[in-house]
Image: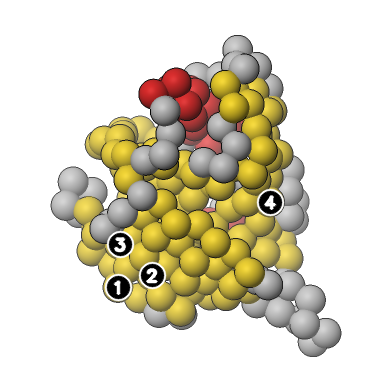
């Protein structure tokens, strides 16, 4: 089954800005509790249109990001039909291969899949993410002397392989999950934004 999806990423975590995971170092504090959300602006998976939907994940990373063994809770946009949900899960669990599969193989355990309301918004470098009652985050892009976004590329780890990542801070990051043992309420820690185009 072939797929092609294009869209935008919002990412926050408990590492300080800039997140060391992206260069292969251990996370600040030894572990990382991060939230990832991929909003699909345009795309099809095996002929199923998934445009306008968002897939998210809250993950506990127990050590170096590249060593895997993540424990994760997955979120499917509540607006997705059953066919769209199955299509999204087939991509983001790595079953259909491609660049997403390399990321998915780092997850050792999925503790659950929840259908929730997901709010995903980006305006002029400011991001807003709400995932049900589990995650709330606001993101601000870091900027250089001429107000251009600060960018990372060619990193050893990426949640948007092949695309540059815009780094910044999160004025708000709250996440709570009993199954994952996560209870986060932080301000000023790592955030990442970017665009992606995944296909296989």
Q: Which mark is residue 175?
A: 3
Q: Are marks 2 and 3 in contact (CB under 8 Å)?
A: yes
Q: Secondary structure at mark 3?
A: strand
- Residue underneath mark 2: 173
Q: Sequence-wise, which precedes: disc 1 or disc 4? A: 1
Q: Residue at x 49, y 66 (%)?
A: 128
Of all residues shown, which one is farthest toward the top?
1
Q: Closest to the observer: 132 or 62?
A: 132
Q: Sequence-wise, which precedes: disc 3 or disc 1? A: 3
Q: Are marks 2 and 1 in contact (CB under 8 Å)?
A: yes
Of all residues shown, which one is farthest toward the right?
146
- Residue underneath mark 1: 185
Q: Secondary structure at mark 2?
A: strand
Q: Disc 3 versus disc 1: distance between alpha carbons? A: 7 Å
Q: Secondary structure at mark 1?
A: strand
Q: Residues within 10 Å of mark 2 (few under 14, many from 20)?
A: many
Q: Disc 2 versus disc 4: distance between alpha carbons? A: 21 Å
């Amino acid at each position: 089954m072939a797929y092609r999806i294009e869209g935008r990423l919002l990412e926050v975590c408990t590492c300080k800005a800039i997140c060391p995971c992206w260069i292969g170092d251990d996370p600040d504090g030894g572990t990382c509790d991060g939230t990832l959300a991929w909003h699909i602006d345009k795309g099809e998976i095996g002929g199923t249109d998934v445009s306008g939907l968002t897939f998210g994940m809250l993950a506990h990373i127990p050590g170096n990001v590249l060593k895997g063994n993540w424990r994760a809770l997955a979120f499917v946009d509540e607006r997705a039909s059953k066919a769209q949900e199955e299509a999204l899960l087939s991509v983001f669990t790595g079953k259909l291969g491609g660049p997403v599969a390399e990321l998915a193989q780092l997850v050792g355990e999925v503790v659950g899949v929840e259908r929730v309301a997901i709010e995903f918004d980006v305006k002029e470098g400011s991001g807003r993410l709400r995932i049900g009652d589990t995650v709330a985050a606001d993101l601000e892009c870091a900027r250089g002397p001429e107000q251009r976004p600060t960018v990372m590329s060619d990193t050893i780890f990426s949640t948007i392989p092949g695309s540059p990542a815009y780094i910044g801070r999160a004025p708000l990051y709250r996440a709570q999950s009993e199954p994952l043992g996560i209870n986060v309420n932080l301000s000023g820690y790592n955030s990442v934004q970017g665009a992606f185009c995944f296909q296989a």
